[in-house]
Image: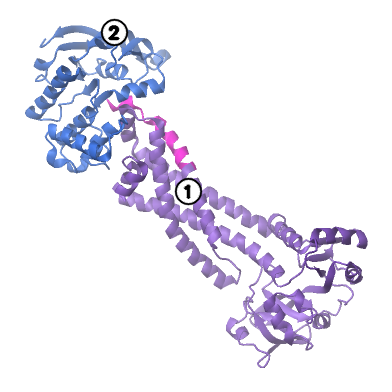
Amino acid sequence: MTHLLERLLGRLPIGWLQLTHNRARLYSAIAGVSFANVLVIVQLGIAGSMTTATLQQYAYFDADIMISAEDANSMTEGGNVARQRLFQALADPDITGGVSLFVSNLTWERPEGQVLLQVFGIDPNATDFLSPIMAHKVASLPLLNAAIIDRKTRGLDAEMLGGIRPHSPETFESSGKTITLVDSFLGGGGFGTDGYLFVSDQTFLNLFAKRISGAPDHILLQVARGADVGAVVSRLRKTIGDKTLRIRSYAEARAQDLAYQNTQRPTGLIFGFGVVIGILVGIVIVYQVLSTDVAAHLREYATFKAMGYGHGFFLGIVLEEAMILAIFGFAPGVIVASGLLSILNAKTGLPVAMTGETAIMVFVGTLAACALSGAIATRRLAAADPADLF
Amino acid sequence: MSGAGENAIVAKGLNHWFGTGEARKQAIFDVNLSFRRGSLTVLMGPSGSGKTTFLTLIGCLRDVMDGSVRMLGHELNGATNATNEALRRRSGFIFQAHNLHESLSAIQNVMMGLQVHGRGLDKRQSREAAAHMLGLVGLADRVDYLPGNLSGGQKQRVAVARALVGNPEVVFADEPTAALDRTSGMNVVQMLKRLGAERGTTTIMVTHDGRILELADRIITLEDGHVVRESDGVP
């Protein structure tokens, strides 16, 4: 390693030699940087689960345009949309089809406790509006009160849910209605509910007696191949002319929902704050490690100053140490953080995970934080006065 | 060599003090001294006489407050950091406490004395030059030892090798023989004397070691910040 660094740096790798000279201090420094990595990765994992959970709902459907109520900041919030808007939209030459989407929450009372399910009601024949997996599953939904349940629903036995098939269904009751679970899919609960449930629009209206077929939560539309979605959206806004509606491309609706979750909802703000705190704590830890190291070698640095070495040389040593700590601290940090996120995922059912993207981002961030901390730590070098050596 | 005259260092009207106001204490009073190239000068005087302060002033380790110090043709009063660093690179320092880098081996410590010059020596050449210098101070068999595994005298000899490996034009030494036995001490001073004769290296040394005085070209005695005696050879 020493020879490799010497070739890379074109000088003696003093930072490396300094770090490895005192193994106990090296290991504690690596542990400090690893801890900072764990902190940031776990916070990012939790914050990322918000994104995953939000986007997951949109991934179940396949649409180009979504019409929602003005106050529908997310898939589950806001008022209803008159079904009449669907027919108006279908009059547009570039609209090839549309479907009503109903969304509501349903409580499954169990002896072990309540399970809150987010229910999507959609015409089971409108398979073009569903993701390929869901399109395949909804074949069994036309039966009244049949449902497909999320296998990762919190509070339910995943093994039991996984065993549900049309020929081996499970039933439960909610609000006096018996629901027959005929199949399952791999979802993963969000922050608002424990899991998802797919039913036909007719079953939905049967389960939620106050809801009417003429007032869905959203209208999903598809446009002709090659049509400009933006242009169609603009045209629909004009032809429908209802200012109380949000007519957006499906991608725009998804992005706006995500932005709303991250910046307007308390959970998003708290998670974002957690990431910032994690990064700050990480920087402080690395700074403390490097600063202590500089202080421990002040006399040696003063000697180098007396020999004629300039500030750039010292900055180089401290940055060398910072980079070594960043690299060596990253691997254990990633391993521990992955383990913690896996435990968190198993315990909560939330889609918390460390993606490759997150790992790269944290690594680059760690290098930057270490470099910044190292640059700040070199300020302590001003205290290394070569005149004190005599 | 700078070619800036026959004196390596000239101090004129040099004053220096520590603290301000009531706490101000003057350490150097109107010192006027010059140091001829290639000479070996010994600074003597009791503790607190200002020897070390004077050494740090003419060695660019401390800012000159009042008066003038010209080192290798450069004025130190008001000199920039870059000038000070450049002049330090042309100097060699031997500290009483040797100040070796604990995580570097003996040879790596000596190589640091070469590396600062950036003379384009490759690793092999640097190592050879450092090993040669360690051989000259009698440490050929200790090149890869860490300072923690060397005796006080051996550390001091590594510090001497580090100071001299870059062929400095001026050597500043503070009690360089204090930790050495008579033979080693005399070897070091004779080496400095030889460098003076062969390369024109100027040596200014603070010492209380009477054994060295017979090799000195000049002996300067300081007391309470004043030069009280100057003599050639043994006083």
Magenta highlight on residue A254: no
Give me the chain that's purple.
A
Q: Chain of mark 1?
A: A
> A354 above or below A297?
below
Label 1: which residue?
A: A367
Circles 2 and 1 on the same subunit:
no
Residue A134: which quarter of the image?
bottom right
Give whichever of B121, A313 is nearer the camera. B121
For the point 15% across and 38% down, the residue is B151
The subunit letter for the residue under badge 2 reads: B
Q: For the C terminus of chain A, which image quadrant?
A: top left
Mark 1 residue type = Leu
Secondary structure type for disc 1: helix
Q: Is residue A249 above or below residue A61?
A: above
Image chain in blue: B
Percent position of residue A68, x then y = 83, 65
Which residue is rendered at x = 54% and y = 54% of the image? A361
Given residues B43 and A67, the one toward you in this image is A67
